[in-house]
Every structure is written in structure tokens, then in C-alpha cells.
Image: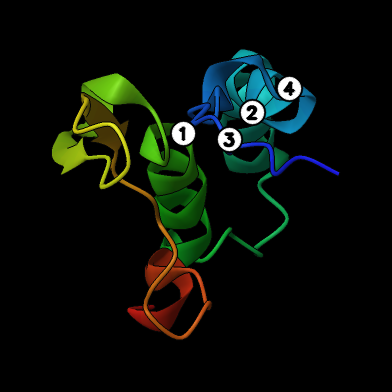
Amino acid sequence: MAFQQAVYRPRDAEHIVLHQVVAEHLEAFLGAVAEAGDGSSLPQFVEREFREFLTCGVFEGGVAPFQCEGCAREHLVPFSCKGADGVPAVAATG
């Protein structure tokens, strides 16, 4: 059995269904909450979490260079919102 070398494939966050749903409906959701006027408002950290989620893993949100040790090819890797402990950094700062 031959060993097959792994191929780097960057995550495509913008094409994940959850990302698309949040991007498409966030403003309408926030507007509906603001218009409800029932005295309960959305905590600021919730809106911040949604907005930061939309930049997580997206090239426009920033990238870091990465060089493959096997082939020495360089890649640009979008910043992730996960911290070193696996907990989303945006949640850990809330």
C-alpha cells in the first residue's frame, strides 16, 4: 500500500451554508430585533459575534503566509476565529 501525500486545501468559508445564511439575513434580523420594541434588546456581544463570524476564514479578513514543509510551496491561509484551545476566539473575548 503506497503512502499518499496530503494536499493542502484551504477552507472556503464564504461557501459554507451557515456563512451564506448569516451574511444574507443578518441585517434583516438585527433590524427586526430593533423594531420589536418589546423592551428586550439583543446584547451587543451577539451582534459582534455574528459580524466577526462573517470575517472568520475569509481572505478579506486577513491572511497569514504558510510554507509547506514537504514541497516548500507557499500558501496564504485566512485567519481563523479559533483560538489555540479550539474555542472560537470571538467567543472567548466576549
The residue tagged 3 is 30
Q: Earlier in the sequence, mark 2 or mark 3?
A: 2
The residue tagged 1 is 54
Left or right: where does residue 46 sit relative to residue 32? Answer: left
Q: Which residue lies furthest to the left in this view?
A: 65
Contact? badges 2 and 3 (CB < 8 Å): no
Contact? badges 4 and 3 (CB < 8 Å): no
Q: Which residue is drawn at 29% across and 22% down?
A: 59
Q: Which of marks 4 and 3 is in front?
A: 4
Determine the CA span between mark 2 and mark 1.
7 Å
Q: Which quadrant of the figure has residue 73? A: top left
Contact? badges 2 and 4 (CB < 8 Å): yes
- Foreground residue, 3 or 84? 3
Which secondary structure, mark 3? helix
Check residue 71 in the rendering and tell me which mark sits there, or answer none: none
Which secondary structure, mark 1? helix
The residue tagged 2 is 19
The residue tagged 4 is 21
Left or right: where does residue 27 sit relative to residue 74? Answer: right
Mark 4, Cα crowd under 10 Å, few <14 / some 14-19 / many 20+, is few
- Mark 1: amino acid: Leu
Q: How many numbered callouts?
A: 4
Left or right: where does residue 92 sit relative to residue 23? Answer: left
Determine the CA span between mark 4 and mark 3.
14 Å
Q: Which residue is drawn at 64% across and 28% down?
A: 19
